[in-house]
Image (cartoon, grey):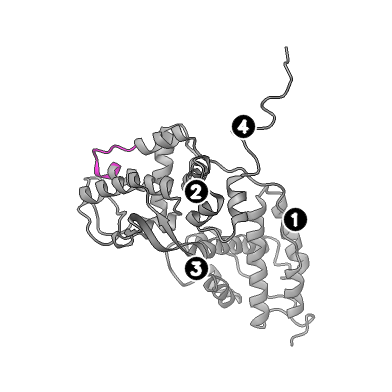
Amino acid sequence: MPNPADCPSVALVPASSRAVAALWPAGRHELPAALAASPFARVLELVLDGLASPHSRRSYALALARFLDWYEAADRPGLSKGTVQRYRTQLDGQSLAASSLNVHMSAIRKLAYEAADNGLIAPELAAGIGRVRGAKRQGTRAGNWLAPVEATALLNAPDRGAARGCRDRALLGFLLGCGLRRAELVSLDVEHIQLRDARWAIPDLAGKGQRLRTVPVPAWVKLLLDAWLVRAQIATGPIFRPVNKGGQVLASRISEDTVWKVVRRYGAEIGQPELAPHDARRTCAKLCRAAGGELEQIQLLLGHASVLTTERYLGTRQNLAQAVNDHLPLEPD
């Protein structure tokens, strides 16, 4: 076992946050030149390759790139508990959400553990870094969602007479009607839509953490889908495909960024320019609950590992539609 005094840290080379952030969404598996030259290059690969989710890989890659940028700007103070605590203090001043800050800290801890396992720092130093606390979440963020009239307006916003608009209506239908995540949506093939118990569904959909679930497809969503499949002459393979400026449907899949842009575009048209795909998923959950859906069934629909996650997601402990302070016996002049 190495002595902490003999190996307090290793020097890191400058890192580019943009380079690392662009690395994993492209599906590449080599480090940028700035990081490849670092003594930690192999460790960085181990950290990122050990994550199953591409979203987690991207988040960790960006968090580590930012940490390495800061480390270089701080004249390489040495990878130690004190260094990480200093960085943690700086993150506190950036008004990050607790979840975002904790992603940064988790990535740094994993980097330290892998560095210790590979003899780059002493295990005692890695253990000290592991004891640097993350942020404690205070309360529950309400998030953003659409009212029924807004959700309907969003569905009707695309031009159904154009191929792109026909696709976008089906895409929005799956987001609002099935509560799918972006990655789940773009991975859909025609063969995934099957009959189960005399209704259309997406059986064995692999979601976050590779958890399997069966997602019911409402009849109106299936109608939007059929309109798109007929218009695009798609019989097999990817459902949601790029459409070029001439209206020609291509054979490949759309990207998750395309889903983001579609939601932002039509969100702006209905007065919600900051609308995100996950807001559509939250809207699905909220409307299911408002329609009398059981909490457990909503959990199964969304693919949450725990019903407590669904409760926090819905904010079911606080009724904003009929808030307790709406009818106070106060009448200001």
Q: Amino acid at mark 3?
A: Pro
Cα separation between marks 1 and 3: 28 Å
Cα separation between marks 1 and 2: 30 Å
Q: Earlier in the sequence, mark 3 or mark 2?
A: 3
Q: Secondary structure at mark 2?
A: helix
Task: Report the magenta residues as a range.
Answer: 157-165
Q: Which mark is residue 278?
A: 2
Q: Is residue 243 left or right of residue 21?
A: left
Q: Earlier in the sequence, mark 4 or mark 1?
A: 1
Prevailing secondary structure of the magenta residues = loop
Q: Secondary structure at mark 4?
A: loop
Residue at the far front in the pictured view? 197
Residue 36 position, x and y percent, is 53, 73
Residue 264 position, x and y percent, is 43, 42
Nearer mark to the viewer, of 1 and 3: 1
Q: Amino acid at mark 1?
A: Thr
Of residues 269 and 205, the one drawn nearer to the viewer in this rendering: 205
Nearer mark to the viewer, of 3 and 4: 4
* Numbered-mark total: 4
Cα separation between marks 3 and 2: 30 Å
Nearer mark to the viewer, of 1 and 2: 2
Q: State yes or no: residue 280 in magenta.
A: no
Residue at image location 64% in from the left, 62% down from the top: 67
Q: Which mark is residue 322?
A: 4
Q: Earlier in the sequence, mark 1 or mark 2?
A: 1
Cα separation between marks 4 and 2: 24 Å
Residue at the far bottom in the pictured view? 1
Of residues 139 and 54, the one drawn nearer to the viewer in this rendering: 139
Cα separation between marks 4 and 1: 40 Å
Q: Which mark is residue 89?
A: 1
